[in-house]
Image (tube, rainbow, N blue to C red):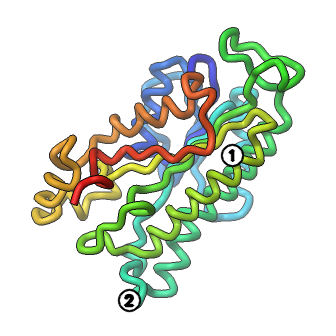
Amino acid sequence: MRDKVLLVSGTTGIAAATSNLALDAGARVFVVGLGEAPALPYPDVGFMAGDLRVPGVAEEAVRRCVECFGRVDALFNVAGISGRRQGDGPLHECSDEGWEVTLDTNLTTVFRLSRATLRQMLAQMPKVASTSTTTSTPASGGLRGSILHMASVLALAPEPRHFATHAYAASKAALLGLTRAMAAYYAPYRIRVNAIAPGLVRTPMSERAQSDPEIQRRMESKQPLTGGLIEADAVARVALFLLGDDAAAITGDALLVDAGWSVSP
């Protein structure tokens, strides 16, 4: 990630962990999210407060990122919600608000920020990883960019007892389909698109699960590799791999980072 420009949606949890690791690796990072700027002790950080559910915010974020750093080499779509507080749940109990807010936050925001980023990536010259220089044609082997979507293990391996949030699962499953479709279309343009599907991670969004002793006990067997919740840094390291040059030949993939969730009873 050295000398690359990374655009990240979200200011806490996995988003913050990935931003920190990217900066440690020599990247420049631009963050867009709700609230105040994240406490990242680096000079090469840009920030824009904004709600990506609002039309026009995604375009403005990309514009400001390019204004700060000249291009966008990588996008990590992280920001999202569980939807439970808005009425998400088993489908027969899910409210209209729960469905609409969850899909709007977890899927429409990804559509908007990816669209704005792709327009920028298609307009910029590919960058050759080894020299960090630009070249005039994609045929030279350079890449225009990399996009990574935040999916979830729940899109692939449901857990009906404790995590029956069906709007959330639908939004994350839709991201897997979007990932494949985007990867197929944009590969000839030297743009990679992948997804990451974590299990239950220790972040502000999982506070309900963290405070529930029954869920904690369940995670001991459901995520046996960690014996409980996964730390955000563990997911961030995988995200950084998929965003960076070491994954230059990978596109259209959805990588599970679930500590064994999907293969455990």
Mark 1: few/some/many CA within 10 Å (<14, 14-19, 20+) = many
Q: Position of residue 264 (x, y in %)?
A: 24, 55
Q: Which mark is residue 245?
A: none
Estimate the spatial distance between the alpha carbons at disc 1 and disc 2, rounded to whole Å.
35 Å
The kind of residue on which mark 2 rests is: Glu
Q: Position of residue 81 (x, y in %)?
A: 44, 63
Q: Are marks 1 and 2 in contact (CB under 8 Å)?
A: no
How many numbered dots are placed on residues in this image? 2
| Residue extending furthest toward the right | 136
Q: Classify 202 as above or below 265.
A: above
Left/right placement of residue 21 relative to residue 264 reads: right
Mark 2: few/some/many CA within 10 Å (<14, 14-19, 20+) = few
Say which of 56 and 164 sits in front.
164
| SS type, badge 2 | loop
Q: Position of residue 231 (x, y in %)?
A: 28, 41
Q: Position of residue 86 (x, y in %)?
A: 42, 77
The kind of residue on which mark 1 rests is: Ala
Q: Quadrant of the N terminus?
A: top right
Q: Quadrant of the C terminus?
A: bottom left
Left/right placement of residue 42 relative to residue 110 reads: left
Read off the residue under disc 2.
93
Sequence-first disc among 1 and 2: 2
Left/right placement of residue 249 relative to residue 71 reads: left
Residue 72 occupies which quadrant of the picture?
top right
Q: Classify 189 as above or below 115.
A: above
* Residue at 10% from the left image edge and 62% from the top image edge: 213
Q: Which mark is residue 183?
A: 1
Q: Evaluate whether residue 19 shows in this view.
A: yes
Residue 238 occupies which quadrant of the picture?
top left
Residue 248 occupies which quadrant of the picture?
top right
* Residue at 39% from the left image edge and 56% from the top image edge: 153
